[in-house]
Image (cartoon, helix red, strand yellow):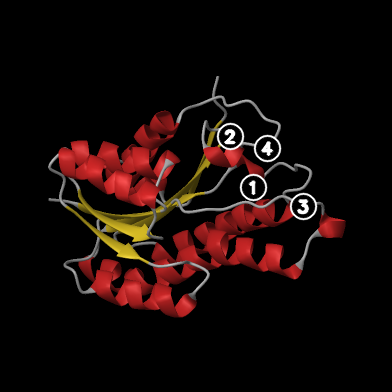
Amino acid sequence: MPRALITGTSRGIGRALSLELADRGVELLLLGRSSADQTETEELLASKGATFAAYYCDFKDRAALDAALVEALHSGPAPDAIVHNAAMIERAEVRQMSDRLWDEQIEINLTAPLRITRAFLPKMVEAKKGRIVFVSSISAVVGTKTQAAYHAAKAGMLGVMRCLAEELSDTGVSTMALLPGSVKTRMLEGSGFTARMTPEEVARTLAYYALDPSPAHNGARVEMFGV
């Protein structure tokens, strides 16, 4: 049974991906905050008879994240896929951007994925298999008012992914990034944009890139604009 670690599974894309992979018989490691929404995701997975374990932490708390990672690392063999989906946005113009708003978004959206990848990478390289998928955003390559921190983090994801792809060459492990546009999730609320795709559509694409493509996709950046 393949194993996949997914971050941010309480709702939206993360929940849709968890359900999609459960339908494909994947063992799931769920990493993120405990919440009523997360409990609902787990109840949906249990109703499907899915095999999963949840590891709770706030990505702003590095010690808590490290503790959850140690527990997940000792839960079994290296994951076949890691999908970095967790994200947050708090909008403000640059001239009004506080250090707190900047630091939180960079920590959750960029630093935490890097630290999670760093924790699991030795085990994946030793197994000579696996994929690391970064859920970036079309915001990585376009500009939007009041979203500087979010854009910076999502663009930073691409930089990390491209460097990681070079480091992973010939290891059997590969990486790529998906850049969705406006998805019908709570994060889109207040953006002024109209949803052009559903979480389920993004989840199906993520499931493919997490499990199915050849290593030749290493370093790929895939954009989703919707209809």
Q: Identify which amino acid the numbered label 4 is placed on.
A: Gly
Q: Helix or strand or loop: what does disc 4 sit on?
A: loop
Disc 4 packing (10 Å; few <14; some 14–19; many ≥20): few
- Do callouts 3 and 4 mark residues in contact (Cβ within 8 Å)? no
Q: CA distance from mark 3 to mark 2?
A: 20 Å
Looking at the image, which residue sits at the far front? 36
Residue at 51% over, 36% down: 185
- Do callouts 3 and 2 mark residues in contact (Cβ within 8 Å)? no
Disc 2 packing (10 Å; few <14; some 14–19; many ≥20): many
Residue with the mark numbered 1? 140
Q: Nearer the viewer, mark 3 or mark 2?
A: 3
Residue with the mark numbered 3? 92
Looking at the image, which residue sits at the far bottom? 63
Q: Helix or strand or loop: what does disc 1 sit on?
A: helix
The percent coordinates of residue 127 (x first, y second) are 21, 66
Residue with the mark numbered 4? 190
Q: CA distance from mark 3 to mark 4?
A: 12 Å
State left or right for residue 197 relative to residue 133: right
Q: Which mark is residue 181?
A: 2
The percent coordinates of residue 119 (x first, y second) are 37, 73
State left or right for residue 181 relative to residue 49: right
